[in-house]
Image (cartoon, rainbow, N blue to C red):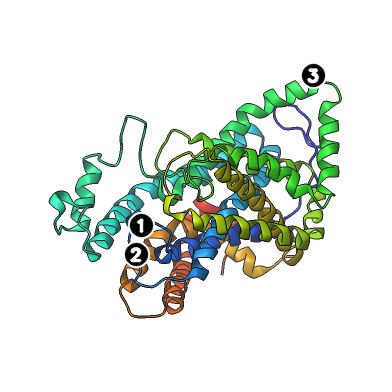
Amino acid sequence: MNLPSDGLPTVVAPASRFYALDASRALALLLGIFYHGIESFIQYKPEKAYFTHDNTSSSLLDFIFFTLHAFRMHAFFVIAGFFAHQLYHKRGVAGFVEHRFKRVILPLVLFWPPLHLIFRSLRIWGRQRLRDFSETPEQQVVSPWLTSWNEFWSGQWFNLEGLLMPLYHLWFLYYLVLFCGTALLVRPLLVAVLNSMGKFRPRFDSFFRQLMYKPWAAWVVGLVVAVAMLRMNQLFGVDTPNNNLIPNTRPFLVYSLFFGLGWLLRRQSEVLPQLKTHRHVTLFFSGCLLAGVYVYFLSQSGRAWADTGSTLFSDQVYKAGYGLASTGLVFAFLGYMLHFFSRPNATFRYLADASYWMYLAHFPLVVVLQILVSAQPWPWLLKVAVIFGVSIATLLLSYQYLVRNRWLGTLLNGKAVRKG
């Protein structure tokens, strides 16, 4: 049992390396690169909602895109909550704040300006190649780079009313800061309240521990997530909170539940092996649920991206089913990762370090490749292979030779950057 700086007790397993969770975090981020890499091929995504639109498509990619959106960020925040708890009890409040500032806030602040300039330029370039000039002044051909630069320095990227600004894929860092900050504020108050209630806290620990040994644990947690999902505006799963500094309470609530689940799992990490025990059954039922909600989504795809906040009974059933399926997929994903990667693996250890940089830097490269291949008369499989293959190779090389043993590698991964 460890005592953090506030003197409040908590149940923590002896310190050890959670190799499977390192691998899970890396794979979740790499799946994010693939997710963005196929975005230009998606048939049910509005054509003008993305940088470009490919002249080929695939129903298989449509389903993969839907599936990845259903669990990858959920799983990431479970892992983030798990390691946040470990960090908090290892370093105390001051050390926790310092670490989160260096690893999360600084990368967000440093990466956003150049990414915005590049993204805005790519948006204009990509749309112009499709003969769409709606992104440019007077709807005519302009220099994407000069236009982006002028808009940046004139402050057109920020709207004070509502604190609107594009966060792009860096929204996950912003929300991770919010979750960590919330944990710092809420935990001492929550523990004080629970301790004042006598045996409630140990009873809750016992309930959670016993629950995780049950084959239906994912569905109990999923019921809570399902209720939170009912508030979503869009039908395409969890709303993406990438355009506002004021937290969007809908995705904030859903992702905070998964962050909290990770926090609880670290409190009682001895229950982690149970995710392996029930992985097959959990995957089967969550897969069946996902297939069902996907069929409904396709039938409503014409309005899937509209911020309607629909209260139709069928939509509510869909959202609840989506929440259950998402939770089951997260449990199954972690179960399989714990089964296959619980021992030290040099490749995944390297990818665990590299994946942070790769995810932060990947999107502009992916978009450039998507724009370049969008009009080519190639089969979609070849195009996806080019986009993903070139992106991964370039990002790995850049990490090895430009990031890993330099100041940026230290910023992203700490001082224990491996030589060689």
Q: Along the line of sight, which residue is nearer the eye, 266 or 398? A: 266
Which residue is depicted at the point 45% across and 48% down? Answer: 170
Query: Which tag, 2 or 3, sits closer to the chain's start?
Result: 2
Q: What's under tag 1, amino acid-wise?
A: Tyr
Which residue bears the numbered disc 2? 53
Q: Nearer the viewer, residue 387 or 394?
A: 387
The location of residue 102, given as percent across then percent down, is 51, 43
Residue at image location 54% in from the left, 65% down from the top: 64
Q: Which residue is mark 1?
A: 50
What's the distance in space between the residues labelled 2 and 1, CA to CA?
7 Å
Tell me how far mark 3 sits from mark 1, CA to CA.
52 Å
Amino acid of disc 2: His
Q: Position of residue 158 (x, y in %)?
A: 31, 38
Circle 3 residue: 196
Residue at image x 42%, y 36%?
245
Quadrant housing the N terminus: top right
Look at the numbered discs 2 and 1 and tell me whether their residues touch, using CB distance below 8 Å.
yes
Q: Earlier in the sequence, mark 3 or mark 1?
A: 1
Label 3 neighbourhood size at 10 Å, few (<14), some (14-19), many (20+)?
few
Q: Is residue 345 above or below residue 276?
A: below
Q: Between tags 3 and 1, which lies in front?
A: 1
Structural crowding at the residue carrying mark 1, measured as other residues with C-alpha within 10 Å and reported as few (<14), some (14–19) or many (≥20): some
Q: Is residue 396 above or below residue 172?
A: below
Would residue 19 be visible to someone looking at this image? no
Q: Quadrant of the C terminus?
A: bottom right
Q: Is residue 353 visible?
A: yes
Q: Secondary structure at mark 1?
A: loop
Under mark 3, the amino acid is: Ser
Q: Which is more toward the observer, 263 or 237?
A: 237
In the rendered structure, the answer to whether residue 24 lies left or right of residue 232 reads right
Q: Count how many numbered circles sit on residues in the image.
A: 3
Mark 3 residue element = helix
